[in-house]
Image: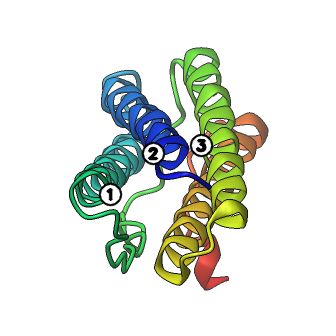
Amino acid sequence: MSSTSLLDAVRVVKENERIASESYARAVNATTNPLGKELFTQLSGFEAYHLQKLTALEKSLEETGEFIEYTGREFPLPPVFEVTAAKEPEQKSVMHIITEAIELEKTAEKAYTELAGRISDLRGHQMFTRLAREEHIHYRILFQAYWSINDTGTWKWTRPDLE
């Protein structure tokens, strides 16, 4: 993969991470449920972290043509609430937000998987593979939230990477 096309790809996925982070930040205000707010806050921060690392990669590729080390980030454990989560009063709008978020995560995972397959540099391959895995975890968390709200009207959040 030429450095120009790699830089172009990094810039595209970087923009996707910015959009995802902003979308999750807006979603925080779309739910009244504390568990939903916390989940969207964590997802927004996670995508902002990806954006930060991709920006550093872009700079390194522009200046030296080298990949940077990406250690990734673990998704936090869900908070422990002492009371049962309340029903989601705006269930339809929250379901719409979650559906859009699921699509964003699937798109990001696919893009990172494709980039990993096109990168011969070991650090670059590992970085994009790890990013794809992190996006897949986000997808699974959101998928679980979708079905929990759909089936019971309440939020459920566990870390699928620990199941």
Label 3 neighbourhood size at 10 Å, few (<14), some (14-19), many (20+)? many
User: Real-space Cα distance between discs 2 and 1?
Assistant: 10 Å
Q: Is residue 59 left or right of residue 148?
A: left
Residue at x-position 36% and y-position 54%: 50
On residue 156, which mark appears?
A: none
Q: Quadrant of residue 107?
A: top right
Residue at x-position 65% and y-position 47%: 111
Residue at x-position 62% and y-position 55%: 1
Q: Is residue 119 left or right of residue 60?
A: right
Q: Earlier in the sequence, mark 2 or mark 3?
A: 2
Q: Position of residue 37 (x, y in %)?
A: 35, 40
User: Real-space Cα distance between discs 2 and 3?
Assistant: 37 Å
Relative to 149, say whether 62 is above or below.
Answer: below
SS for tag 1?
helix
Relative to 146, say whether 46 is above or below.
Answer: below
Look at the numbered discs 2 and 1 and tell me whether their residues touch, using CB distance below 8 Å.
Answer: yes
Q: Amino acid at mark 3?
A: Thr
Look at the numbered discs 3 and 1 and tell me whether their residues touch, using CB distance below 8 Å.
Answer: no
Q: Amino acid at mark 2?
A: Val
Label 2 neighbourhood size at 10 Å, few (<14), some (14-19), many (20+)? many
Relative to 103, say whether 80 is above or below.
Answer: below
Identify the residue position indicated by label 1 in the image. 61
Q: Is residue 134 left or right of residue 21?
A: right
Label 1 neighbourhood size at 10 Å, few (<14), some (14-19), many (20+)? some
Identify the residue position indicated by label 3 in the image. 154
SS for tag 3?
loop
Q: Amino acid at mark 1?
A: Leu
Q: Earlier in the sequence, mark 3 or mark 1?
A: 1
Q: In the depicted view, which residue is nearer to us: 106 or 123?
A: 123
Q: Position of residue 28 (x, y in %)?
A: 33, 32
On residue 10, which mark appears?
A: 2
Q: Position of residue 14 (x, y in %)?
A: 40, 40
